[in-house]
Amino acid sequence: MFTSQLMKEGEITPGIATKEYISRRKRLLELLPENSLAIIAAAPVKMMTDVVPYTFRQDADYLYLTGCQQPGGVAVLGHECGLCMFMPEPKPHDVVWQGLIAGVDAALEMFKAEEAYPVSKLDKILPNMIKRSSKLFHNKLRATPTYTDLETFQNAAHVGKVSDLSIFTHELRWVKSPSELKLMKESAAIACQALLQTMLHSKTYPHEGMLSSKVEYECRMRGAQRMAFNPVVGGGPNASVIHYSRNDQKIKDGDLVLMDVGCELHGYCSDLTRTWSPCGTFSSIQEELYDLILQTNKECIRLCRPGASIRQIHNYSVELLCKGLKEIGILKRDAFRLYHQLNPTSIGHYLGMDVHDCSMISYDRPLKPGVVITIEPGIYVPSSFDGPERYQGTGIRIEDEVLITETGCEVLTGSMPKEIKHIESLLNNYSYTKGMEATTV
């Protein structure tokens, strides 16, 4: 496998050592109630057509605890059994078409399971493990009939003995280890470099589809396995649609383009947004709104430190934006209610193995060193908005990744320009032809 060429000795996945996976399982067992059992299923293969699968992406909890990146498995973790992995069994036909897969031997030797069996034996072994347990936890979103159809599991669920494992795994995943942070910084650097190249590309090729293709190409050429989500490339009024995904329109001269992108590197996501004018010049109206969002971005980043919470930072961002939008004249009376028509989103979210990571952790939780969040103020004025016509159909967002540190924070996407003067200088002093020649030398 390609990833095996990237791994150092002692690693199960690139950047994460075997001992770290063992430590994660140990910490989960410390959180689990006595005599309980955790059942974690791998993500299933999803089909595009009857014979064409979508690109496989592993369930974050299964990957976090085992390091195994293939579908079809079920992992069981308990105080008595340790890690027990039920592994898929390839048929000769599968090997011909899809290649070799990790089986029982790999579970013991590579993933360091204490026990391992073919998945075909799960219905004979797991029921006894369930009977001996007083409480079951499983990754509810990935629940598979392989174990949920077992009579013993259904009986346990019926009497309230089954709960969602995410309350524990999200707690573990919330604060990143040094190895995880190294991967997240690399993922952020790749996304920044890719978006910068795409920004420079936009003056010559102002088309949403081309910019979407360009940023994915640049991410993959720098080692990312996939995009973390479908890029948002909204030109002109399309930028006011928060999760716009069509990406099929030409960007009109003088319009802004909003690009929200992120890539995934060995299981860890990046996420950033920049808004700019591909023609190389912001209009005075665009500059007025952009400056409000930029100043809000900077002020909110200043609040990022241990003890603060996403909720507190969000509430401060609403105050800043409401005040600024009233001064500009977009909001008048009943500003707070109307503001939520222009920005119904949170100032940010947790980031990690999933883009919206650790959803079980409240936004009221005081932040700790090692937590990564996004700061992404924005304004989305629909064309139908009852306000000054000159602002209608405008969308602007500036999003950065922020790592909470012992003394404050570190902006992981700080290398990506966001000052108007820097963006305009880049676009107006860059020769696309020279840039292409430089990359081919």
Image (spheres, rainbow, N blue to C red):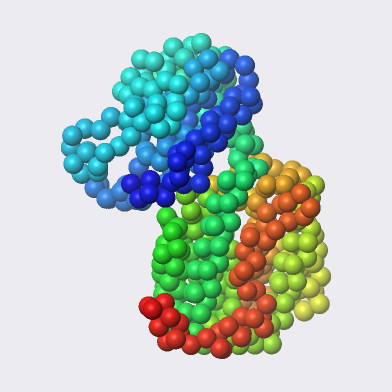
Tell which of 246 and 19 is nearer to you: 19
> In the picture provided, is 11 more to the left or to the right than 299?
left
Vertical arrangement, residue 293 with respect to residue 103, above or below: below
Q: In which quarter of the image is residue 390?
A: bottom right
Residue 392 % position (x, y): 63, 78
Q: Is residue 251 visible?
A: no
Vertical arrangement, residue 398 with respect to residue 277, above or below: above
Question: In what quadrant of the picture does the C terminus appear?
Answer: bottom left
Vertical arrangement, residue 326 with respect to residue 109, above or below: below
> In the picture provided, is 346 more to the left or to the right than 223?
right
Vertical arrangement, residue 40 with respect to residue 351, above or below: above
Q: How many labels does the image show?
A: 0
Residue 68 % position (x, y): 42, 37
Q: Quadrant of residue 237?
A: bottom right
Residue at 59%, 67% (x, y): give it: 273
Residue at 36%, 15% (x, y): give it: 124
Residue 291 % position (x, y): 72, 77
Q: Can residue 284 be seen in this view?
A: yes
Residue 397 % position (x, y): 63, 69
Residue at 49%, 35% (x, y): give it: 18
Tell which of 433 and 211 is nearer to you: 433
